[in-house]
Each structure stands twice: as structure tokens, then as C-alpha cells.
Image (cartoon, helix red, strand yellow):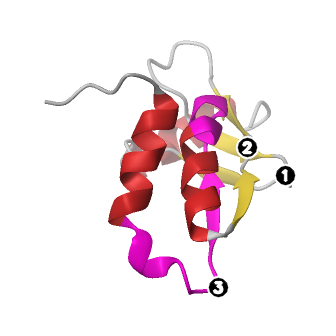
Amino acid sequence: MRYFHDRNEAGKLLAEKLAEYKAKNCSVVCLSAGGVLVGYEIAKCLHASLFKLNLESVSLPGEPKPVGTLSSEGTFTYNSEYSKVELEGINMDYHNLI
């Protein structure tokens, strides 16, 4: 396993591996605040636009992991770690909260 000095270094090294996309019309999407530092280096190298997707985890009482995420646009996505049967049970128990 290789450790990086910082996220900027990680972004620069990743950008080298993605150099074939430099002439393409592409965007870099970051999923976390820390990912912006990595994404910035990639976007700079590829001359691409950079976006941060704002997500908020949705947790319910008694559930060990978040049931899903809510985007800044209001889109709710269920956590894929739950099975269909588990999600049906959660929806029945917490319908008013979700």
C-alpha cells in the first residue's frame, strides 16, 4: 500500500494516469470536501471543470448505517448495502421520517 504526502500529491499522481482524457470534454466530480483537493489537481491537469456533489447521509434511529443520502438538489438515494427486503421493512417502520 502506498501512502501519499498529502491529497494534492494523490491528485497529481491520479492526473498522470488520466492524462489520456486531457483533450476530451470532461468534468471532475468530488464527493467530499477532502476529495476537492484531489479533484482540483486532476481538473487542473485535464483542463476540466470541477464540481463538488453535496451529499448528506440520512440516518434513522436504531439503524447501524445510513439508510441513504440526500443531494443538494433534493434527490434521495437508498444505501445499496441494504437488501430490498431490509429497505421495505425500514420504509414500513419509518415511513413518516423518510
Q: Which residue is mark 1?
A: 74
Judge left or right: residue 58 versus residue 85. Answer: right
Per the rendered image, the range of residues in magenta is 18-37
Residue found at the far top of this picture:
62
- Label 3 or label 2, whichever comes before in sequence order: 3
- State yes or no: discs 1 and 2 in contact (Cβ < 8 Å): yes
Where's residue 55, x and y in %?
70, 40
How many dots with numbers? 3
SS at mark 1?
A: loop
Q: Residue at x 72, y 58 (%)?
A: 50
Quarter of the rendering containing residue 35: top right
The answer to whether residue 33 is magenta is: yes
Q: Which residue is mark 2?
A: 70
The answer to whether residue 73 is magenta is: no
Q: Which residue is mark 3?
A: 25
Label placed on residue 11: none
Judge left or right: residue 37 versus residue 51. Answer: left
Disc nearest the viewer among 3 and 1: 3
Where's residue 2, x and y in %?
19, 30
